[in-house]
Amino acid sequence: MAGLAIWILGWAGQANGADNTECLACHGDKDGAKFIHEEKFTGSIHGKLLCTACHADIKELPHADKLKPVSCAQCHRIETDIYLKSDHGRALSKGITEAATCQACHGNPHELLNYRNPASPVHRNNVPATCANCHANVKEMEKYNLRQRAVVVTYDKSVHGIAHAKGVANSAVCSDCHGTHDLHRSSNPESKLNWQKIPETCGKCHDNVRQTYNRSIHGKAVASGIRDAPTCTDCHGEHTILAMADSSSKVAPAHVAETCAQCHGAERIATRYQLSPTVVDTYMKSFHGLAMQFGGLAVANCSSCHGFHDILPSSDPLSSVNKANLPQTCGKCHPGIGTRLAQTDFRIHDLPGGGKGKPWLVNFVARFYIVIIFLTIGGMGLFVGLDYAAKVRAHIQVVKASPHAEERLTKWMRVQHFALIFLFAMLAYTGFVHKFPDAWWSWPFKALENGGYVRGMIHRICGWAFSGLFLIHLIALVVTPRGHKYLLELGPRMHDVKDCFATLRYNLGLGGALPPPRRFNYAEKAEYWALVWGSLVMIVTGAMLIFTETVLRLWPKVWHDVAQVIHYYEAVLATLAIIVWHFYWVIFDPKESPMNPAWLIGKKAGHQESQQKGEKPDVPH
């Protein structure tokens, strides 16, 4: 049809009497307007046509300065009609001038070459570079919100792009998958990349794989219209397809489980299609899964047992996981014992240990050990707890009876300390439950119907109580004589810095002596002022998070975000400081063993009792 149209237009051009030689007399001049390279035009696919075959409005020479635009549809009606219905054609009809036109892909019409010509922009060797003229411009792709923006870079690094760069014949290029004039986005049912047509598109090159896939459970599901069934691109990727031997490939042994988990680990898909929701989790916790997570690439993964493109349900006699075929499947990795491994009454994905459907002997042994562990460790814990409590009581009695015992905390201060312990523990616990709702320690609130509300109320009530306690403590420091005294004693001094470095030098074995005993040493002062500062920070940021609307009315939102960050990380810092610093100095420090009892009775062992425990005496400077 196109040939007939060209012949008719050529005849019409002759009828007009115009000759190409006359046209090139002007347009063949490099210094003239609209220069046309005569040699390239003659060698082009249009070279046998008269100029007036396309520029039909030329009736005489010289012609008018402004001619009508030439339409490729004059000859290529079918291709043009297909193009106009494509994404490029529709974009152009909407006024998007950047959309690809005939010339954008095929080149200058006066120099246009047959697509079989290696110099043609649409020769398959040149197609990626031609498409890259537009699609390599990432900013331009972002402008039109294209789903994949760095397509050229990813294609170049893919197994197809690498093969094309090496000159491998028939390696896939853009037009093989996306089409040419009939290019559509994947959401269009007519697109070659529509999810139901992907197996057919890929099958043009991978026909054997396509036939195998079509017989598989996934292929049958796609053919029946199940959108969630995986196609080629779901497992292999799209522009990022890599060879299986490439460690970064989605189907490399190290990533197969992760790829399969995209569907089989999704609750929505497992529920909708009545699949086991635990297959991914049980595999990851199995011997094979654990070995894979530690880098064992030779260990069995999903495809080792279920297959690749030939995946079938276990009820199918041809399935590699059908009970009759398990000896052979297991025997691939475990020669000689495949039959023994396949002889089991429970599912392959079941974890070691007892459980429903397991042999009675396995369940009996598992329960027996659970009981033994509970009784043994529980008994040890009870015994150790009683022993520790007895030693603490004995230590307290010694401190009470000692004439050298040092008074540290008054009754009122001990009440504050008890309140601080309770409030800090509740705030830390409920705060971390809010941050980590899926952690094991969060189960009490998850078990409640309104657990989130209850947690929030407890956290806020304790927060306000903590703020009140902090305010009372500050008032007591400023107003009462005893508070003034403690404030002076806890104030930083130059000897605190010297004591810190002296202790560090002594503990490193660099000589010197330990600093003399102080009413409050550098460690206690540092902890106290850190508590004051941390409390102030937590109260201020906590109030900002409670009164969110007020904060946002007064300041930009960034300050609310900053308050969230500070509140969380200050909580982490305070909790770790208590565990690492405070617990050591009051419990694990050999001088205080088994515990500094000041928080219970207000007194602690004096300096003389510490020396009797065998510690090296402090030598004054």
Image (cartoon, rainbow, N blue to C red):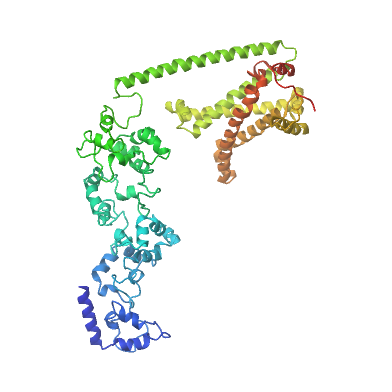
Query: Where does residue 613 sit, x and y in percent of width and height?
Result: 69, 17
Give the number of marks: 0
Which image quadrant is residue 294 in? top left
Query: Where does residue 77 sit, x and y in percent of width and height?
Result: 24, 71
Work out whether residue 298 or residue 32 is closer to the camera in this orientation and state it.
298
Work out whether residue 57 or residue 479 is closer to the camera in this orientation and state it.
57
Q: Residue furthest right?
A: 621
Query: Where does residue 569 sit, x and y in percent of width and height?
Result: 57, 37
Give the residue displayed 61% in from the left and 28% down from the top. 578
Query: What is the quadrant of the N terminus in the image?
Result: bottom left
Q: Is residue 156 above or below residue 5?
A: above
Q: Residue furthest front?
A: 336
Query: Where does residue 304 sit, x and y in percent of width and height?
Result: 31, 40
Q: Is residue 437 above or below residue 141?
A: above
Which image quadrant is residue 318 in? top left
Q: Is residue 517 above or below residue 168?
A: above
Query: What is the quadrant of the C terminus in the image?
Result: top right
Is residue 67 at least partly visible in the picture?
no
Query: In the image, 335: left or right of 548?
Result: left
Work out whether residue 485 or residue 406 is closer to the camera in this orientation and state it.
406
Query: In the image, 105: left or right of 598?
Result: left
Work out whether residue 294 or residue 143 is closer to the camera in this orientation and state it.
294
Give the residue displayed 34% in from the left and 83% down from the top. 38
Give the residue displayed 25% in from the left and 28% down from the top. 343
Which image quadrant is residue 229 in? top left
Query: In the image, 463: left or right of 340?
Result: right
Is residue 612 at least partly visible in the picture?
yes
